[in-house]
Image: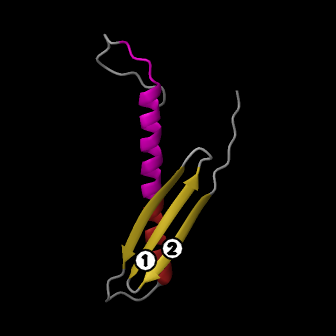
Amino acid sequence: MTHTTEWKTRVVVFEEGDITKAQASVDTTTATFTGYGMARRNPRDPQVHEIGDELAAGRALADLSRKLINEAAQEVDENEERDPRDSEPSRLWL
């Protein structure tokens, strides 16, 4: 059985003074997940916008990744068939 789907991820980055914030969203067709990230420039560092953008976006994507993994883990738990005699739950996905 083959299954293919395409999810588009949108990353929005905005800067407010020395703080850069990012929001990363993905629509899975059944749900939308959003991650957030922030980077703060040290006032002594040179103002290089790309560095703040990359850090904030990377942190937003990492947050989004954690949310997707947590959702998958919750769905695995909800779909497990458990034998009440088992003390150790089985795992559908590794």
Q: Is residue 13 above or below residue 17?
A: above
Q: Secondary structure at mark 2?
A: strand
In the picture shown, does residue 50 fall above or below 24?
below
**Circle 2 Cα neighbour tier, 10 Å, few/some/many (<14 / 14–19 / ≥20):** some
Q: Which residue is mark 2?
A: 13
Residue 71 % position (x, y): 45, 42
Q: Which residues are magenta?
A: 62-83
Q: Residue at x 44, y 70 (%)?
A: 56
> Of all residues shown, which one is farthest toward the top?
85
The percent position of residue 41, horizontal first and vertical second, equals 36, 81
The kind of residue tagged 2 is: Val
Check if residue 77 falls in the magenta segment: yes
Are dots 1 and 2 in contact, CB under 8 Å? yes
What's the residue at 51%, 73% (across, down)? 13
Where residue 4 sits, quadrant-wise, is top right
Q: Amino acid at mark 1?
A: Thr
Q: Position of residue 94 (x, y in %)?
A: 46, 31
Residue at which label 1 appears: 20
Looking at the rendered image, the quarter that the N terminus falls into is top right
